[in-house]
Amino acid sequence: MSFSMATINKTYSEIFKLQWCRIN
């Protein structure tokens, strides 16, 4: 379970960065 959460959290961070770059 913790592995899934870590993977999802990492993926979410990457997506957030990409979206942030697009907005700015």
Image: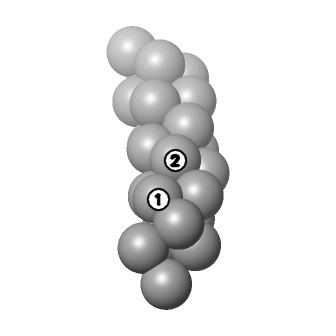
Secondary element under disc 2, as helix, strand or loop, is helix
Secondary element under disc 1, as helix, strand or loop, is helix
* Image x and y of residue 3, in percent: 54, 23
Q: Residue at x 53, y 66 (%)?
A: 22
Q: Is residue 8 above or below residue 4?
A: below
* Amino acid type for the residue under numbered disc 1: Gln
Query: Would residue 20 appear left or right of 18 to someone viewing this image?
Result: left
Q: Residue at x 52, y 47 (%)?
A: 15
Measure the C-alpha gap from mark 1 to mark 2. 6 Å
Quadrant in the rendering for residue 18? bottom right
Q: Residue at x 47, y 59 (%)?
A: 19
Q: Which residue is mark 1?
A: 19
The numbered mark at residue 15 is 2
Residue closest to the eye, 21 or 1: 21
* Image x and y of residue 7, in percent: 56, 30
Residue closest to the eye, 2 or 15: 15
Residue 21 visible in rendering = yes
* Amino acid type for the residue under numbered disc 2: Ile
Query: Would residue 10 appear left or right of 12 to someone viewing this image?
Result: right
Judged from this view, the residue extending furthest toward the bottom is 24
Mark 1 vs 2: CB contact within 8 A: yes
Residue closest to the eye, 2 or 13: 13
- Quarter of the picture containing the N terminus is top left
Residue 13 visible in rendering = no
Q: Is residue 4 above or below residue 15?
A: above
* Image x and y of residue 4, in percent: 47, 19
Judged from this view, the residue extending furthest toward the front is 23
